[in-house]
Every structure is written in structure tokens, then in C-alpha cells.
Image (spheres, rainbow, N blue to C red):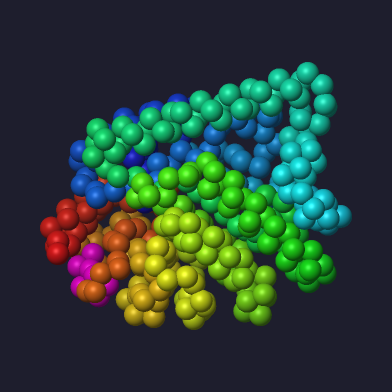
Amino acid sequence: MSEMWPVHHCGLSSSEVLKNPLLFFDAFKKTFSEIYIDGLYSLGNLWIESLFNTLNNTGSYVLSDGIVNYEERNSCYMDVSDYYALIKDPLKFMLNEFFPKKFEILSYGDTRSAQALNQAFQAYRDHRQKSMYLFEQTENVLGIPVLARTVASFGPDILHEFFRGFQGVVTDINRCPQLFLEASSVLTSCITEMKMKIYNTPEDGHIVMIPLHLGTFLKPKDFEKFYLPFLIQVLELYTRADYTVCLFLENDWTPYLEYFESFPKGRILGIFEYGNLHEIKKRVGNYLCVAGGMPISQLAYGTKQQCIDTAKRVIDECAPGGGFIFTTDKLMLSLNDGRFENIRAAHEFVHEYGKY
């Protein structure tokens, strides 16, 4: 899960590659000629800088320390009273009410708005074309498969990240729970349907990546009512349509492992940031494929031998029986997330020791 690490390793800046995603290929070509990998979890070029610039980005996304950051304080562009319009017709609400709030230039309703919208679409289309080319070059020229073909989300996380912010959704859960539940259900169905239209070839061997954010910040009773049903809903929608789903289980999901029994069986991969992966696999290995194991903190601050020892222990504990993918426990966003010699030593060891 190299994300921006190869970019910084090759002396490129985040701003350069975000302006021209094809530079990712140069970073991949150099980095992975020096470090062996079986595959990338994604390309890492998800932020479309040209699109946000066209719409006069309000500041929700900023580039700092070479990393794209999301600022929570700017994430609430929807009022409680907007729930009714969102539930009635989510696409109409987003296009005609939400986006003009988030991007002021779209609120003018004149040639300025039309021009900005057209330029934003052109920026998106250009980014998509370059991304598809980057996929093809990485897989066909470098021989490195890219696991995730698209990134998706579902109701509660969408409300949290794009519409109401953390403070907003926690307030809504307590003060207008029924509206939150209805909106979560409608958004889960609507956004999943849109994603399936965009990525409509589940048989191609790639996956839908779904990062999970809000769930672990809710108390158990609220998790069961306001998060779990929609997580199961989105998993069932994708797996019934023969998509393979990768859940990026951010934060510590150890207290929630019992709920995995209600997931649809098969076609689900889970990347765990925290927790004892051996114990996690023993508890949920029958419900999903488990990924993780290599702490980036050790890659950054440990010795080569410590990294190799950890890799050996993780494989010995988690590989038997299959259903396991060795990778880092977190995304490698900056150069300081791992020393080159440690990363190469761990990968070379796993390449040889992990054969079966």
C-alpha cells in the first residue's frame, strides 16, 4: 500500500503528480525495479486537483507536507432541513442544492456556472483517461496488477464525510435518528448503483475499495443501529452482483469482530490497521480474506532484521490455510513512513519465504 511513497522516493513532489498523474508511472517504474512487489492496492492518484481548482476549491482539501489532507471543519454544507430533499431525490439534491453550496461558482446560474461545470467535466474526463492509461501501463508494461479499480462508500460514511461532518452526524443520530437512517439507506443504494454503472466489469479480477470511517467512533448500540445495517447492505449489493470488495478497516476494529459473522460469505477482503492479526484471522478468517501485518512504524524506525523477523512471524501465524495477504498495516503517504532498506529487505524476504 505504497500510496505516495514511491513519488517521494523518486524525488517527485505530490503537487507535480497530482497535476500530471502519468508521472506516477515514472515513480512506479523506478521504485519497483528496486523493490519487488506482487501488486499495488491502488494507484494513489484519487484527488483530481484540476477539477477542484476549476470549481474554486473551498478549502476542504489542502496539500500540506506533501500529502493531500481533508479538513473536517469545512465538511458541513448540508442543514438538517435538507434531509427531506436528500431522501426524496438524492441526485437532484446533490446537483441543484448541495454542490452550489459547496462550490459558490455553481450557485450563480449564469455563464460562469456553466463554464465552470463544463471545465470540471473536462478535467474529470482527462483525469479518468490518464488513470486508465496508468492502470494499463502499470499492469501490462511493469507487470504489476493494481487491485482496486474504484473507491466507493455508503450511507453513514457519505453523510459523515461529505454532507454533515462528524459533529453533524453524531448530533443527527441523537436528535433526528429516523432521518439519518432513511438518508443512509437511500444514499447506499443510489451511490452503489452509480458505481456499478461506472465500473461495470466485476469479472475483470479487480476490486471495489471501501474505506470505513465513522463506525468505530460510535458506541456499540449506535454502531448496531446506524452503521452495521448499511455496511451489510452495501456488501450484499456488490457481492450479489459478483463484485469483490475490499474493506479498509481504519482504526481498531477488534471490538467489532463479532459482527463480521453477518457479512455475506466470500468475495470480501479486509485490510486491518490495528490489532493482533493472528487473533483477527482466527476469529474472522471464515468470513473474509485478511490483509495487513507489517507495521509501517517498524519500516520507518526499526532495523532490517527486525522487519524481517516481523515478516516471518506474520507469515508463520497467518498464512496457513490461505485467506491472507501480506501488506503494510497503513498507507505509506510520505517518505518518512518507511526506510528504503527496510522496505526492500522485508519484501525480498516475503517474496522467497512466502512461497507455497
Q: Is residue 79 visible?
A: no
149, above or below 116, in the image: below
Q: Main secondary structure of the magenta part?
A: helix
Residue 10, image x, y percentages = 31, 34
Tell me the magenta residue range: 311-319
Residue placed farthest to the right in the image? 81
Q: Nearer the viewer, residue 316 or 356?
A: 356
Magenta stretch contains residue 249: no
Residue placed farthest to the front in the image? 241
Q: Is residue 47 visible?
A: yes
Does residue 170 appear to the left or right of 150 in the view shown? right
Does residue 17 appear to the left or right of 174 in the view shown? left
Residue 80, image x, y percentages = 83, 57
Q: Nearer the viewer, residue 305 or 234?
A: 234
Q: Residue at x 35, y 67 (%)?
A: 289
Residue 310, image x, y percentages = 25, 67
Q: How many marks?
A: 0
Q: Quadrant of the C terminus?
A: bottom left
Q: Residue at x 40, y 63 (%)?
A: 267
Quarter-wise, where is residue 125 in the image? Answer: top right
310, above or below 257, in the image: above
Q: Residue at x 66, y 80 (%)?
A: 221
16, above or below 32, in the image: above
Does residue 146 appear to the left or right of 98 in the view shown? left
Residue 271, image x, y percentages = 41, 62
Q: Residue at x 31, y 32 (%)?
A: 137
